[in-house]
Structures are given as structure tokens and as C-alpha cells.
Amino acid sequence: MRKYENGYSDKIKYWAEQYNKAFKANDVAGIKTAINKLEYFTERHCAFLQSVKTPIRVGSIVRFKQGWMSVSRVTKNTVNLRGIYGGSVTDKNVPIESVTEDSAGYWKYFRGTDAYASM
């Protein structure tokens, strides 16, 4: 198996192009194949990015306690957190060591919810 030292972005670009071609040609089988490949490589790329120790920035989705939060402010040692889709800050001056970047985990969870299924 080939090592993807820089992630899977080339594979994602390729399958996005294949999706666009299949979509324009009304090729249902091609669309389904491209979507499956995009989901597969996107998930692998997110895991790759997380393994690289993604820095925490404003807007990052982080794991905190038992759930996911969005970062609204970052200082050298602390972060402020709020709900993922905005709203007021719910946790201020949280030590940066107590949160971990986990956007891949959140989106994996979200794809399994009824809200995602009803979109």
C-alpha cells in the first residue's frame, strides 16, 4: 500500500473531477462511485490531518469534556468556546491543553444523525 505522506488531497481532487464529469454526463453509476470514493478519501484525509496535530485556531472544532465546541478566541495558553453553530461564549479561559482539535470526529458523528439524513 502506498504511503500518503501529504494526505489524500490529490485523490480528493481527482474524484471530485470524476464526480463533475459523471454529473454532466448523467452517469448515475459514475456519480455513486465518485461519491463513495470522495467519502472514503475525505475521511482518511481528515484522520491524516488530525494525526499531524492540527493547530487550534478561531473557528476550529474541538473536543471538550464530552462534546464538541467551536473556538471563538485563542490566546497563548487559553481558548474561549461556544456552540459549533455560533451563539454566546459558554466557556472562557479554558486551558488550551484541555481541548483537542477534532473536526473529523465531529463530522463523522454528524453524518450519522437524523439532521444530516434529512438534508
Image (cartoon, helix red, strand yellow):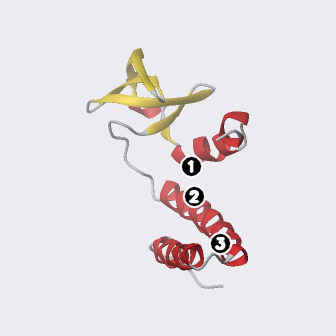
Q: Nearer the viewer, residue 101 or 111?
A: 111
Q: Are marks 1 and 2 in contact (CB under 8 Å)?
A: yes
Report the number of numbered marks. 3
Q: Is residue 91 visible?
A: no
Residue for point 72% across, 43% down: 112
Q: Is residue 109 above or below residue 33?
A: above
Q: Quadrant of residue 63?
A: top right
Residue occupying the far bottom of the picture:
2
Please give left or right for residue 104 compared with residue 90 in the image. Answer: right
Q: Nearer the viewer, residue 24 or 14?
A: 24
Q: Earlier in the sequence, mark 1 or mark 3?
A: 3
Please give left or right for residue 48 compared with residue 58 in the image. Answer: right
The CA span between labels 1 and 2 is 7 Å
Please give left or right for residue 91 compared with residue 111 in the image. Answer: left
Q: Mark 1 belongs to which amino acid?
A: Ala
User: Mark 1: few, some, or many residues within 10 Å (few <14, many ≥20)?
Assistant: many
User: Mark 2: few, some, or many residues within 10 Å (few <14, many ≥20)?
Assistant: some
Pointer 1 residue: 104
Q: Earlier in the sequence, mark 3 or mark 2?
A: 3
Secondary structure at badge 2 equals helix
Residue for point 55% across, 79% down: 18
Residue 21: where, in percent of width, then height?
A: 53, 79
Q: Mark 3 belongs to which amino acid?
A: Ile
Secondary structure at badge 1 equals helix
